Image: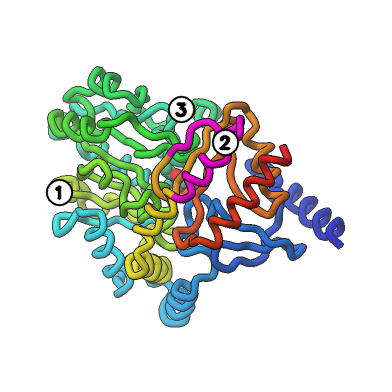
Amino acid sequence: MTEVTQGQWKGRFGSAMMRTLATPQLMLERGEGCRVWDVDGNEYLDFLAGIAVNSLGHAHPALVEAVSRQVGTLAHVSNYFSTRPQLELAERLRQITGAGEQGRVLFGNSGAEANEAAFKLARLNRGRSGRRTRVLALHNAFHGRTMGSLALTGKPPMREAFEPLPGGVEHIDSTIEALEAAIDDRVAALFVEPIKGEAGVLELPDGFLQRARELTEQHGALLILDEIQTGVGRTGRWFAYQHAGILPDAVTVAKGIAGGVPIGALVTFGRASELFTQGQHGSTFGGNPLATAAGNAVLAEIEGADLVGNAARRGEELRAIIRSFDHPLIGDVRGAGLLIGIGLTDGEAHRLSAAALAQGLIINAPNESSIRLAPPLIVGDAELAEFREKFGRALAAL
Ligand SMILES: *Cc1c(COP(=O)(O)O)cnc(C)c1O
């Protein structure tokens, strides 16, 4: 039975799906809480959550109820009309980001689209003289796969086949010294991923965000933070920049805000809210009532159940569990809250994630020397105990 099911879907996948994706190891059928089941009925503990997307885990009743109710009421209306869920989510985002009354929100459907909008915002910061032609971004940062967001992405192997990309972007090292050397009055914006998730959960040097805030302010450049992976509670604060005690000029959000319903948003602060004018950007689906109702349900649940606090506490516990293994393969433990990177002392990440999967545990290898964990923000004692057992068995099986 297993062979039959596996053989069938893998062949179909290889034939019908674009070759951009490697054939996945599993076909999943359903989920509940922090668990998913494959088509053969095997159960897995999900410590990836669709890459930091399923904030409330799978099939959370609050999300199921909100989406079901909204799709049965009004799913989509076009941007010729507004809806209650849309305005409610925009106001929530202004509030949790700290953008407040001067904040504005532009909705899209993905992280890449949120960054495309942010890139366009950066272009509008050229000023009357048109001097601001430079955009700075960081080596190794990931900002998306569309042409503009790819231009911002600091990973040459992803970019090369698609050049020429939108111009003016320069990538610098993630150090205060490199930033000080690069910035001047011709910089329109600095894009920063506060913790580089796709690069293996790499943190910035201490003081980087504070210095970036000072320098961008001094030179009139926008500080634009990509919180698509780190945002909405993931790191133990609503946003990672809140650990640094700064406010950006704009922040992009997506992954975790609607628990799996596609959405993205650009939130602007202060004078950056005045840059876009009527007709300069838009999206058919962006901000529709279905996606924004999902976002409201997820954010209300994160707030009501203090899942931001849970992410901070459970993140500490999870880090302690990982350190307790005292296994020669485990190097440093990185990240914040429930976005955790495990640096491996040897290039065994794909073997380790495959061994974990065989034990019924989903973890991720963003590269050969790192394991990434991004469990649902609802994890509790039972899930952490199960992780300890399954991860331990995976390490032992290597
Ligand atoms: C996932 C991600 C993106 C791209 O989001 P998509 O929804 O895949 O387009 C951009 N930036 C960061 C930091 C991400 O983690």
Residue 38 in which image quadrant: bottom right
- Disc 2 under 8 Å from ligand 1? The reply is no
Stretch of the chain drawn in magenta: 317-334
At label 2, the amino acid type is Asp
Q: Position of residue 205 (x, y in %)?
A: 33, 29
- Foreground mark, 1 or 2, reads 2
Is residue 378 something one can see in this rendering? yes
Q: Where is residue 389 in the image (x, y as percent from the top left)?
A: 63, 52
Q: Where is residue 80 in the image (x, y as percent from the top left)?
A: 31, 68
Check the picture and name the quadrant holding the C terminus: top right
Would residue 91 appear left or right of 57 to someone viewing this image?
Answer: left
In three-dimensional space, the C-alpha distance between marks 3 and 1, rounded to whole angstroms, equals 33 Å
Which residue does the numbered mark 3 point to in the structure image?
Answer: 164
In three-dimensional space, the C-alpha distance between marks 1 and 2, rounded to whole angstroms, equals 48 Å
Q: What element carries label 1?
A: helix
Q: Residue at x 41, y 26 (%)?
A: 139
At label 1, the amino acid type is Gly
Residue 233 in which image quadrant: bottom left
Q: Is residue 260 above or below residue 85?
A: above
**Viewer-proximal residue, 372 or 384?**
384
Is residue 321 inside the magenta stretch? yes
Scheme by which the image is coloured: rainbow
Which residue does the numbered mark 1 point to in the structure image?
Answer: 270
At label 3, the amino acid type is Pro
In three-dimensional space, the C-alpha distance between marks 2 and 3, rounded to whole angstroms, equals 47 Å
Which residue does the numbered mark 2 point to in the structure image?
Answer: 326
Q: Which of marks 1 and 2 is nearer the N terminus?
A: 1
Q: Residue at x 29, y 75 (%)?
A: 84
**Viewer-proximal residue, 386 or 83?**
386
Check the picture and name the quadrant holding the N terminus: bottom right
Is residue 155 inside the magenta stretch? no
For the residue carrying disc 1, how many other residues have a C-alpha within 10 Å: few (<14), some (14-19), or many (20+)? some
